[in-house]
Amino acid sequence: MPQPSTYQTKGGMVYRRRLLPAEPSPGDLRAVVEDYQTMLVSVMTAIAERYERRPDYPYIDTKLSLLTGEDFREDDQRRGPGSIYGWIQGRGLEALVEHCLWWRAHPEIEEGAALIPRLERIMREVLARLRSLRRQNGVHLFFLMTPEGEPFVLNEAQQRVPLTAWSSEVYCFADLFCAKGIFAAGVYLEDAEAQKEGEEYARLVQEAILDRRFAANERNCPPNEGPQPNPHRRGHGPYMIQLGTAALMCRFGTSPDPYWINAGLALLRHIMEHHVNINDRMPGLLPGDYWEEIDAAGRPYVDQGALLSNPGHSIEVTGLGLKFIQAAKSSAALRAAPGAALGPTERRTLDEMEKVLPLIFLRNFTNGFLPEVGGICEFYDLYSRTPRSPHMPWWSLPESIRAAAEAWEVLAKNGAGADAAAPYLKALSAAHNAFARHYVRTDLMLMAYQTRGTDGLPVDHIPATADADPGYHTGASIIDFLRIVERSCPR
């Protein structure tokens, strides 16, 4: 069914589905700013309204089908309101902070500024709830919990089975996302105790990642064992997402302690040494190719003759990595004691990473982007150079917009000419146009289809959680893009 060509918020902001030229100039990027400002307001208005309709439900509620627009059934064991996703609550807290900060800096966006008190209320209540549930469960939060905070998994029949055992020493993505969210909300709300808890929680996650006590099977672990690391297959995912934590800590931290600069560098070094084809370490692959998993010996994990990449994840790494480097170079630790916080080796590493990350972005965007249907494939085989999934999730497109803008800005700052920067602006245009044309729903509050098939049609496929994005990929990534346009694109 055709969608309306425009969307108007209650306050009169208009989304017009503006597209970029295939080879945009920096000035062209300003043409899409109004659309994204409208999208941010519309999505956050929906989140506020959904929260306020249930006073007894202290959770961010994005439990609706992005295919039909209808709320999930109350009795749906996987998707209904009785299933709280730790990922969504942690991501959602961070997203609320980013939106409020953006509108505080831009009071001329009147609808956004008017939303701030409503979003701050959500932030306070969800923050208090997550901290309470963490105390209730020892030191952890979980992928799936009941509204009362009891962790569970789903069996093959999609029925809840209580999680009866877990190790206090093993951490998961729910811990990672919630640590970030608790810290960010603590900073924004000037809640020193929450900020301290979030930072300490994030350090525990960092140590677990580096000590290989991080488990990726939280969605389908045995209920009587809990999540456990897999010694035979290790993904880059925790290193990637924790780069965002390091960026957040460097950006908002006030301590002269360089812990988070060193933490981010350790994460980047691991990724570069184990997951990226640099200096022709994997003959037959292209420079910048990025594989998803490694085996027990640290070699690329080959599954039935295929070496799989998730192009969206590879792109997200570059965006978070460049964001970390920028935050590290302007951090309080570096300002307080430049020589102590960053020695010559560490400074050189940051500079080298800043040069190579844009190249990794371009390689993996080229690998994954399917121009004929306008999306990024979920998996790609680096051996056969072909897509290995019929699905194209939405989130990799806004991540591409952020990463391409960051890469372009870094190149411009370092004196690269227009020819060197042009491929990044071209990729940004392709990602934006695909997102605007094929994913953004003008008939559903400017939310985006979660997944389209490689045939171009929306499909009922859940990339990670059944809940819709709480303004994390589609909001926080876009806000980073808008900040770059604001400071680097001429009027």
Image (tube, grey):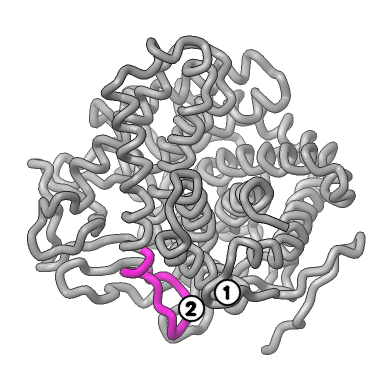
Q: Secondary structure at mark 1?
A: helix
Q: Quadrant of residue 43?
A: bottom right
Is residue 106 found inside the magenta-colored segment of the image?
no
Callout 1–callout 2 Cβ contact below 8 Å: yes
Residue 143: which numbered mark, if any? none
x then y, percent, for residue 139: 45, 22
Label 1: which residue? 433
Q: Which residue is drawn at the image coordinates 19% and 50% (left, top)?
A: 278
Specify few, some or many for label 1: CA neighbours under 10 Å numbering under 14, 14-19, or 20 or more: many
Amino acid, disc 1: Asn
Q: Earlier in the sequence, mark 1 or mark 2?
A: 2
Q: Is residue 97 left or right of residue 469?
A: right
Q: Secondary structure at mark 2?
A: loop
Q: Is residue 221 visible?
A: yes
Q: Which residue is drawn at the image coordinates 40% and 15% (left, top)?
A: 341
Q: Which residue is drawn at the image coordinates 80% and 43% (left, top)?
A: 106
Q: Which residue is drawn at the image coordinates 34% and 38% (left, top)?
A: 239
Q: Quadrant of residue 419?
A: bottom left
Of 363 and 76, nearer the camera is 363
Of 180 and 65, nearer the camera is 180
x then y, percent, for residue 409: 51, 50
Label 2: which residue? 374
x then y, percent, for residue 369: 40, 72
Q: Is residue 57 above or below residue 348?
A: below
Amino acid, disc 2: Gly
- Choose mark 1 or mark 2, whichever is in front: 1
Is residue 375 found inside the magenta-colored segment of the image?
yes
Q: CA distance from mark 1 to mark 2?
A: 8 Å
| Residue span colored magenta | 365-377
Q: Quadrant of the N terminus?
A: bottom right
